[in-house]
Amino acid sequence: MDRSLLTIILIFAALSAIHLMYVVIGKLQPNKDYTGIGFRIKTWWGMLFIFCLATLFNPVVSLLSLMVLCFFALKEYFSMMKSRKSDRRLFLWAYLSIPLQFYWIYIEWYGMFIVFIPVYVFLLLPLPRMINKGTVGFMRSVSSTQWGLMLMVFGLSHLAYFQFATPEYGAGLVLFLVVLTQLNDVVHYLASLYVGKRKIVPTANPYLTWDGFAFAFVITTGVSYLIYPYLTPLNPIFGLLSGMLISLSGFFGSLTVSVLKRDLLIGDGDKFVALKQSHLSRIDSLTYTSPVFFHVIRYFFDFM
């Protein structure tokens, strides 16, 4: 507990310093757009709060907090879809799967946790859409809903499972994952803003550049190697590889969600701008980094 408390204090101090720098730089360079970083900093404060609840109080509190996060992320995802009245029952079934997914985590039933959404929900989800609702738009509504469940519920729910899979190291692994994921996003954003020239998908996300990706990959890998001894029981090789893995998967997560948003919001520019400030824009990378990091660590280490 002493080590965990010290870690929280250090992170709180570092986050306070970053927040102060953000405010000062924003005033010194008002012509630069730093709103993306501001949203990330708000996310960091929220994640720190959840980490404190999990470490100092009870993992169940953290589990409930992450369940609420999944609900709002899925809700915002559904708000992007051009849905019909016939899709409402489909969305209701999707929402009902959230508490069930987190219940499997609570009782530590890994087998059901890992197949519930990819297998059972996938097979049963079309039923409420088919019954007396016709066939118009069936494929788009069902497949879009399943994509949302896989990313916003299945992917993010892995954050909650860390603390049940390994009570001793779970909170530290979650913090390690979140810090590196958010760091990767911010470095990519800043490098793309200042030195980025070769855009990856300019039609979906003008902030993603190959130059930013290279900077983020190097810095995230380096920071991973520096902090892994304090937050994880990993060995030096995995301390280095984890940074590479998180950087790559975070990049693909951010890119995928950006393309999804652009596709779902074609012709609705006002809503697209509004969703830049949403939960979805802050945790897009975590939808990929959480399951990838979880399963790699679980496969190679006995403590998971």
Image: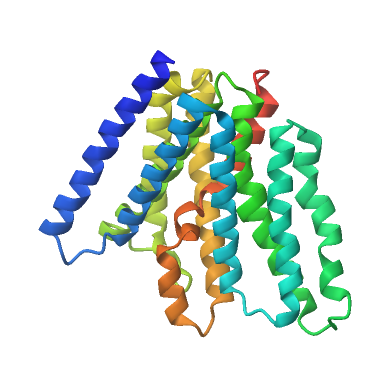
Report which quarter residue 256 is drawn in.
bottom right
Q: Is residue 292 visible?
A: no
Residue found at the far left of this picture: 28
Above or below residue 66? Residue 211 is: below
Q: Residue at x 41, y 38 (%)?
A: 49
Residue 288 location in percent, x, y? 58, 48
From the top left corner, tell me how far across and down residue 45 is, in percent. Answer: 36, 43
- Compared across the picture, whether 132 is left or right of 222 comes to right
From where the camera sits, is residue 72 visible? yes
The total of numbered circles placed on residues is 0
Q: Is residue 75 above or below residue 158?
A: below
Against 240, residue 183 (above or below) is below
The quadrant of the picture occupied by the C terminus is top right
* Quadrant of the frame with the N terminus: top left
Q: Is residue 52 left or right of residue 156?
A: left
Quadrant of res 224: top left
